[in-house]
Image (tube, rainbow, N blue to C red):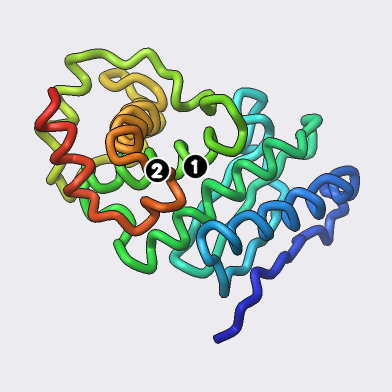
């Protein structure tokens, strides 16, 4: 088995030049963490300039594209911190490892668990809840989400990034709340829950609410 987690910096425009001294250390710190805690391997991480991530996201956004690829979108117009890069890498690599057991996005409930676990993993290493785990979600939204847990045609954009009907970052916050409660109940951290059956977390929520 090829053990490597590889870094690729797409920087032909030079727009990431001012961040190389932060990108590289953050990558290698994250690599060390996930190799130890998640037994992570065979992942390519690509850093790309993008104007998409704004200040509230720390100028960084990530996307796991299956079990072996992470795309890191970097807006170098912002003074991006080492911590923001490091924690986003942990979040996305957690997704990669989980995708080796459970497919991402099967239905709303499983996706909420996916994002909740990765967000909890960030908090465990950063000491604070990420901003998208702090949304002021409504009971009516929670009830609607629970009714749609098995919906395979849910809108990722609506449930995780908001709409006129759903609070922005609802899916991340609700997922974090579910996973944090389950983590406390079983005494296991997010790394230990990376391949947990999502029905156990959803079931625990149903039993206690």
Say left or right for 39 vs 95: right
Q: Secondary structure at mark 2?
A: helix
Compared with residue 30, is residue 148 higher up or lower down, i.e. above or below? above
Picture quadrant where residue 136 is located: top left
Say left or right for 173 vs 106: right
User: In the image shown, does 208 or 169 lie closer to the viewer?
Assistant: 208
Picture quadrant where residue 78 is located: top right
Measured as percent of width and height from the top left, residue 133 is found at 44, 26
| Quadrant showing the C terminus | top left
Q: Are marks 1 and 2 in contact (CB under 8 Å)?
A: yes
How far apart marks 1 and 2 lie (CA) works out to 6 Å
Q: Which residue is mark 2?
A: 117
Q: Residues within 10 Å of mark 1 (few under 14, many from 20)?
A: many
Measured as percent of width and height from the top left, residue 115 is found at 39, 42
Compared with residue 63, is residue 97 higher up or lower down, i.e. above or below? below
| Residue 192 numbered tag | none
> Which residue corresponds to the image point at 59% horizontal and 38% vertical from the top-left?
125
> Which residue corresponds to the image point at 47% horizontal and 61% vertical from the top-left?
96
Compared with residue 96, is residue 130 higher up or lower down, i.e. above or below? above
> Which residue corresponds to the image point at 81% horizontal and 58% vertical from the top-left?
11
Residue 161 visible in this rendered orientation of the protein: yes
Measured as percent of width and height from the top left, residue 127 is found at 59, 28
Compared with residue 132, is residue 14 higher up or lower down, i.e. above or below? below
Measured as percent of width and height from the top left, residue 14 is found at 87, 53
Say left or right for 83 vs 91: right
Q: Secondary structure at mark 1?
A: helix
> Which residue corresponds to the image point at 39% horizontal and 59% vertical from the top-left?
98
Picture quadrant where residue 7 is located: bottom right
| Residue 121 numbered tag | 1
Residue 158 visible in this rendered orientation of the protein: no
């Amino acid at each position: 088995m090829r053990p490597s987690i590889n870094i690729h910096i797409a920087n032909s425009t030079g727009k990431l030049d001012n961040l190389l001294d932060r990108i590289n250390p953050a990558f290698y710190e994250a690599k060390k963490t996930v190799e130890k805690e998640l037994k992570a391997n065979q992942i390519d991480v690509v850093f790309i300039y993008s104007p998409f991530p704004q200040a509230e996201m720390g100028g960084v956004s990530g996307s796991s594209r299956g079990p072996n690829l992470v795309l890191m979108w970097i807006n170098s117009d912002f003074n991006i911190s080492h911590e923001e890069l490091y924690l986003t890498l942990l979040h996305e690599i957690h997704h990669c490892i989980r995708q080796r057991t459970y497919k991402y996005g099967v239905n709303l409930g499983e996706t909420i668990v996916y994002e909740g676990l990765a967000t909890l993993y960030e908090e465990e290493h950063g000491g604070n809840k990420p901003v998208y785990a702090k949304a002021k979600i409504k009971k009516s939204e929670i009830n609607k989400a629970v009714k749609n847990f098995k919906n395979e045609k849910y809108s990722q954009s609506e449930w995780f990034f908001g709409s006129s009907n759903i609070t922005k970052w609802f899916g991340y916050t609700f997922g974090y709340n579910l996973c944090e409660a389950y983590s406390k109940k079983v005494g296991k951290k997010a790394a230990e829950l990376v391949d947990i059956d999502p029905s156990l977390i959803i079931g625990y929520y149903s039993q206690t609410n």
